[in-house]
Image (cartoon, rainbow, N blue to C red):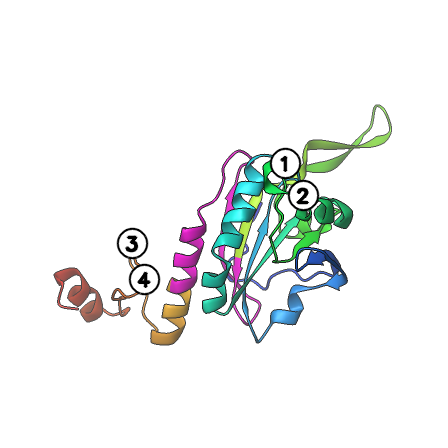
Amino acid sequence: MSVLVGKRAPLFEADAVINGGEFVEKFSLAQFIGKKYVVFFFYPLDFTFVCPTEILAFQKKLSEFEKRNTVVVGCSVDSKFSHYAWLNTQKNYGGIKGVTFPLVSDLSKTISENFEVLAGEYDYDEDDHEIVFNGEPVAYRGLFIIDKQGIIRHQLINDLPLGRNVDEVLRLIDAWQFYEEFDESCPANWKKGENGIKETHQGISEYLSGKK
């Protein structure tokens, strides 16, 4: 697994379900280049336990992402039909009905491989002369913040049991957009509305002394 920060996000065309129930062929992140920031996140499987808590948490804060000119896109190795069924299952039955952001189908696992979040790998068993998969044939909880030029600015990979913090994703988007606007870096625990740091000795001294 390598670091993709600072590199162009891998592009793809795949089936997806949008607006809670519309099938789309050849969905691509390329449509957002030059227009939107993107939060692209992977989750292991539909109809599981931690995954719906994350997806519903993103949906709950979707308006906050929209205020930041940011789209949220989820992806797993399930089929578009599984996504559709899950999106149309009530929450009290383990579903995610009401979620409107796109869910991409990575049935071939190539998107997960290109983003290097697949929790295993294919190998050749020389004894049995067959292709085998070592590990889990699902994606880790990978999350990527992609800027409007299609460059990855943040990468987070959690193991399967560890859910993510949606508020932290919003904070990081704020931080990157602050940097783009003011050309100032964001110190530890920075939050929107706070001062940044000019990358000069004087700027750092002013920040640390509380003069800024």
SS at mark 1 in the image? helix
Q: Which residue is mark 3?
A: 188
> Magenta region: which residues?
145-174
Q: CA distance from mark 2 to mark 3?
A: 41 Å
Residue kind at label 1, given as amino acid type? Tyr
**In front here: 181 or 9?**
181
Which residue occupies 30% across, 58% down?
190
Q: Which residue is mark 1?
A: 93
Q: Which residue is mark 2?
A: 89
Q: CA distance from mark 2 to mark 4?
A: 41 Å
Q: Is residue 68 visible?
A: no
Q: Dot 3: within a 10 Å radius of its alpha carbon, few (fewer than 14), some, or many (20 or more) residues? A: few
Residue 165, percent from left and from top: 44, 46
Q: Is residue 112 above or below residue 212?
A: above
Labelled pair 2, 4 in contact (Cβ < 8 Å)? no
SS at mark 2 in the image? loop
- Residue 2 lies left or right of residue 111; in this view the side is left
Residue 100, percent from left and from top: 61, 57
Q: Which residue is mark 4?
A: 186
Labelled pair 2, 3 in contact (Cβ < 8 Å)? no
Q: CA distance from mark 2 to mark 1?
A: 7 Å
For marks 2 and 3 on the same chain, the one whose residue lies earlier in the sequence? 2
Classify the position of the C terminus by image quarter: bottom left
